[in-house]
């Protein structure tokens, strides 16, 4: 049951979304998170900027399908309210072709993933682990 305001009545055609462009993440330690996303997850850098007026780094990373992950740093960002059930973005889910190899690659970097389980609705194997700031990341493998 929602406790927010009621949705406005539909007055026109639905928006036609063609995909996800990017997901933005704010890191508490830019260098640590940059290493995690580029070296552990293997995401290539598209652009990297330091915005002096905001004391903020902005790193654009590329996924194979064209979706991007934007990694930001800001001075003294507030902590995430809870894990993982805070209101708002719950987790980032990444598609992988080989779940076993992906979990092994994480382990080689010292990243502990939950035991792989099967989604009861889709049949896909999945697991969760956390980025350096505790953001939950899900890996979703192909349905056997």
Image (cartoon, rainbow, N blue to C red):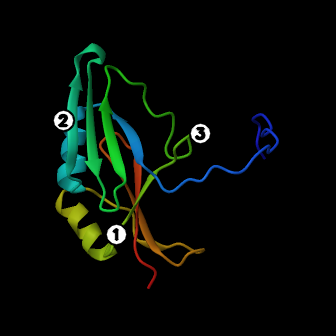
Q: Along the polypeptide, which appears first: circle 3 or circle 2?
A: 2
Q: Position of residue 101 (x, y in %)?
A: 25, 74
1 or 7, which is in the foreground? 7
88 or 120, which is in the foreground? 88
Q: Which residue is mark 3?
A: 87
- At x 80% / y 38%, what residue is drawn? 6
Residues at marks 1 and 2, CA–CA distance in whole angstroms: 25 Å
Q: Position of residue 40 (x, y in %)?
A: 21, 55
Q: Along the polypeptide, which appears first: circle 3 or circle 1?
A: 3
128 or 72, which is in the foreground? 72
Splitting the image into 4 quarters, where does residue 133 fall? top left
- At x 20% / y 36%, what residue is drawn? 48
Q: Which residue is mark 1?
A: 96
Determine whether the residue tagged by mark 1 lies in a helix, strand or loop.
Answer: loop
Determine whether the residue tagged by mark 3 lies in a helix, strand or loop.
Answer: loop
Residues at marks 3 and 1, CA–CA distance in whole angstroms: 27 Å
Q: Which residue is mark 2?
A: 31
Residues at marks 3 and 2, CA–CA distance in whole angstroms: 27 Å
Q: Position of residue 36 (x, y in %)?
A: 22, 47
Q: Position of residue 79 (x, y in %)?
A: 42, 29
Determine whether the residue tagged by mark 2 lies in a helix, strand or loop.
Answer: helix
């Amino acid at each position: 049951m929602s406790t927010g305001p009621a949705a406005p009545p539909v007055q026109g055609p639905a928006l036609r979304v063609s995909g996800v462009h990017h997901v933005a993440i704010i890191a508490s330690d830019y260098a640590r998170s940059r290493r995690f996303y580029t070296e552990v997850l293997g995401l290539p850098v598209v652009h990297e900027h330091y915005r002096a007026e905001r004391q903020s780094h902005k790193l654009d990373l590329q996924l194979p399908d064209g979706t991007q992950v934007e990694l930001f740093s800001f001075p003294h960002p507030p902590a995430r309210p809870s894990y993982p059930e805070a209101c708002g973005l719950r987790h980032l889910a990444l598609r992988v072709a080989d779940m076993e190899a992906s979990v092994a690659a994480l382990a080689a970097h010292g990243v502990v993933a939950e035991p792989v389980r099967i989604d009861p609705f889709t049949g896909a194997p999945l697991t969760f682990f956390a980025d350096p700031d505790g953001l939950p990341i899900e890996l979703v493998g192909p349905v056997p």
